[in-house]
Amino acid sequence: MPFNTYTFLLFFIVLLVIYHSVKSWKYQKTILLTASYLFYSAWNPLFVLLLMFSTIVDWLLAKKIFQSPTKHTKKWYLITSLVVNLGLLSYFKYGDFLLENSIYIFGLLQIDFKPATLDIILPVGISFYTFQTLSYTIDTYRGKIQPSKSFLDYALYVSFFPQLVAGPIVRANDFLPQCKTPRKTSINQFGWGLSLLTIGLFLKIIIADTILAPIVDKVYAAPEYFSSLETWTAILAFSGQIFADFSGYSTAAIGVSLCLGFILPDNFKAPYAALGFREFWQRWHISLSTWLRDYLYISLGGNRVSSIRTSINLMITMLLGGLWHGASWLFVIWGGLHGLYLIVEHFITQYIKLEKPLNTITQVLLIVLTFLIVSLTWVFFRAESLQDALTIFSNLHQSPTSHKPQIEGVELLLALATIVILVSWHIIIKNSSIESFFQKQQNVIKGLILTLMIMAIFLFASGDDRAFIYFQF
Amino acid sequence: MHLSTSSSNDRLPQANWIAIWLGILVVIFSIIAYFEWHIRDLGWSPSVVDSPDLWVEQRKKASALGDKALILVGASRMQLDMDIQVLREKTKLEPIQLAIDGTSYLPVLENLANDPQITGTVLVSVNAYNMRQGIPKDTSIQWVNYYE
């Protein structure tokens, strides 16, 4: 039940009415938990059982970790949690991938290995809720949190429907304290929550699906038929599409939560205004990058070790971060390239110390350069195969007239204009926030912006049923 | 762009949200009502939304009609630029619309070629980038699978 459907709209309206008309906080939370399971079962009812299993296992293990008298037993319970969670994730997400690669390796060794294919269905959102439950047990092991006394609160933390299938990945110490006292939704929260839901849907339905996705889909489906101009446009368009798609979901999730009185963490902060890759990862999918930093990078030693070891830690983190996105070597290449950029940047900033801050023009040029490199790296993320990715790169330096144009000029122009506006908007709002932008506007302007967005959704939506990209992760 | 109110309520834009959202609803319903009234006044009426079930219904007809079928295969150009009534009158054949918006024609053509009951005429609209067969996640593959 994605946010961009009429089914969700109906579900949300009914839920709001029931949730806000009940007085007991315990009943309100029970309603939210039931709604969350209902929301999840719209994809596949059977996988609700998997979600419940993961919830119960980590609930029990966190209690055991907390109650264990010795470090040694705590460690064994933590290892059990890691094995169960990562085992399930590996089976459902990487089972087929591991099998295919095993067959390939056996083939190289000239061993005839033909196992039955697994044909595993990936439970939607498994990567997100697995990381949430893992953070709960790891934080309990590290003594950062105490296990929740209420199973209802904990189950709601794992399954809270706005962020269940595509994040943000919420930490227990951000969410569980909110479950202790009844959430009173103020008029400002409710009004702004609906506004964020509108902005999120506008980003997804208009920017991602209507303006950018058609060009991206065409070029990436058969890149050899497109000119350099069309290929460049598709590459830049995908940068815009994935941002609008994913940040659109996060924004809508934050808005929906706010209407229910819950506050979720930021997931994007103008990422295309990043100057360098370290800053990019501080602004892109923040809940994942901070998760990887806190539970993987720091566990490996982080930057408290030698420069070489820090580089290795960075690379391992980014390679696994890439693999988290999906069972494909292309995601590993994408993660590896970002790891490489971070290592190069780490050495540059270590050896080149600036005496005075960069001037504005240099800053903008470096932001654009970062954006271009990030965009080119997205090719590995989006391409269907390595061969397609290489074809796309080989297209880039061809003559613009080498192919008969396949995409209309207006479509190209609209996509390019959208990207220019998006990057400019990120640069403008880099040190500010969308909240402060809205705060500065008069009520009429606020209403006008939201009206135009809603009208655009109704009038110009492409009608294609496109799932949110991050659902597959 | 801080797209949430993570830290506190301080970042929440303060406004008369009740008035804003009531205003938005009134304006939107008025515009939609006017728009609906205006296009109906111009002679437009609601049309059918394409769906796998409707496509399967047409696909079955393509097999059943035999030689009398004029099967249209392709994407939006074939789907939206063909006047079925004119085709019927000019060709004396029964046009069957199997074109699917924004997809490759190849999975549909392959499905027709593998069906011995298809003996009618197939008219295909070709796009160069659709020449490659088996484009992943293509709607046409899903609809053909739904039929099979």
Image (cartoon, coloured by chain):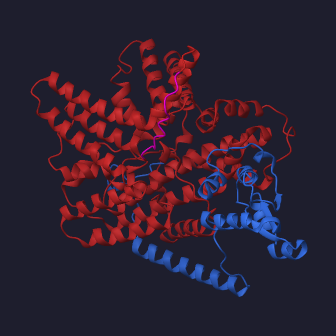
Chain colours: A red, B blue
Indicate yes or no whether the magenta region holds residue B81: no
Q: Residue furthest bottom?
A: B41
Q: Quadrant of residue A252?
A: bottom left
Which image quadrant: the N terminus of chain A? bottom left
Q: Is residue A278 visible?
A: no
**Viewer-side residue, A6 vs A22:** A6
Identify which residue is drawn at 24% across, 39% down.
A58
Residue A126 in picture, x, y percent from top left: 39, 43
Q: Residue furthest front?
A: B116
- Name the side, left or right, on which A325 lies relative to A379: left
Q: Is residue A338 above or below residue B117?
A: above
Total count of labels = 0
Which span of residues is magenta-colored? A113-123
Q: Is residue A352 above or below residue B138?
A: above
Identify which residue is drawn at 36% across, 63% down.
A259
Residue A408 in picture, x, y percent from top left: 79, 53
Q: Quadrant of residue B29?
A: bottom right
What secondary structure is the stretch in magenta mostly built from? loop
Identify which residue is drawn at 49% across, 77% down.
B25
Q: Residue furthest left?
A: A69
Residue B28 in picture, x, y percent from top left: 55, 76
Residue A57 in picture, x, y percent from top left: 23, 40
Identify which residue is drawn at 68% across, 42% down.
A220
